[in-house]
Image (cartoon, rainbow, N blue to C red):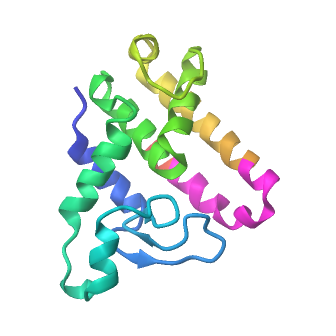
Amino acid sequence: MPDFSPAFERMIQNEGGYKLVNIPADRGGQTYAGIARNFHPNWPGWRYIDGNDLQNLDLSAQVRSFYRENFWDKISADKINSQLIAETIFDFGVNAGPVTAAKLAQIVVGAVPDGRIGPVTLEKINALDEMQFILKYALAKMARYAEICNKDRAQSKFLLGWLNRTLRGLA
């Protein structure tokens, strides 16, 4: 069974750590530790961020719980046999949403892409060679990023970062 802790540590590095940022053209708007205010306005951590000095604020437990509940659990990562496969789906889920990450995994393994990793998808993921899945999934992610940029040129400024994130997952 994959372990959430190393997956989380790798992902939080990809998200830039525990920082508050607001990047122009980022659809998520203001983010803290990669949690986008526009997509998750009800995250309890915003209350503390808006009312306190970030230098003296430790939201690490809330951030960890948020990612476990909203991403790791949503992709059924605990039921995937491979740590690396669970990590790559999880990391992409954080970047693109768990439904998109699940659909892409389903396409890679030849399952119906409904965005929910259930028993049939899990069986197919767990039957596939780990490196074969990782490489096919990386190519599918890159194609997805290109598609996003082709639809909205303003997103092109993020393409290199997305590609580098994908390539780091192969190392």
Name which residue lies at 80% across and 52% down. Answer: 151
Left or right of 161, for residue 87: left
Whether residue 18 is visible: no
Q: Is residue 39 magenta?
A: no
Name the residue at 63% across, 77% down.
Answer: 24
| Magenta segment main secondary structure | helix
Q: Is residue 71 above or below residue 24?
A: above
Q: Residue at x 32, y 50 (%)?
A: 67
Which residue is at 45% across, 14% downward?
A: 128
Which region shows up in magenta? 148-166
Residue 69 in view? yes
Quarter location, residue 33: bottom left
Provide residue 51's location: percent of width, then percent of height.
29, 85
At which x and y percent is residue 61?
Answer: 18, 60
For residue 165: magenta? Answer: yes
- The picture quadrant where one finds residue 107 is top right
Q: Quadrant of the N terminus?
A: top left
> In the depicted view, which residue is nearer to us: 62 or 4?
62
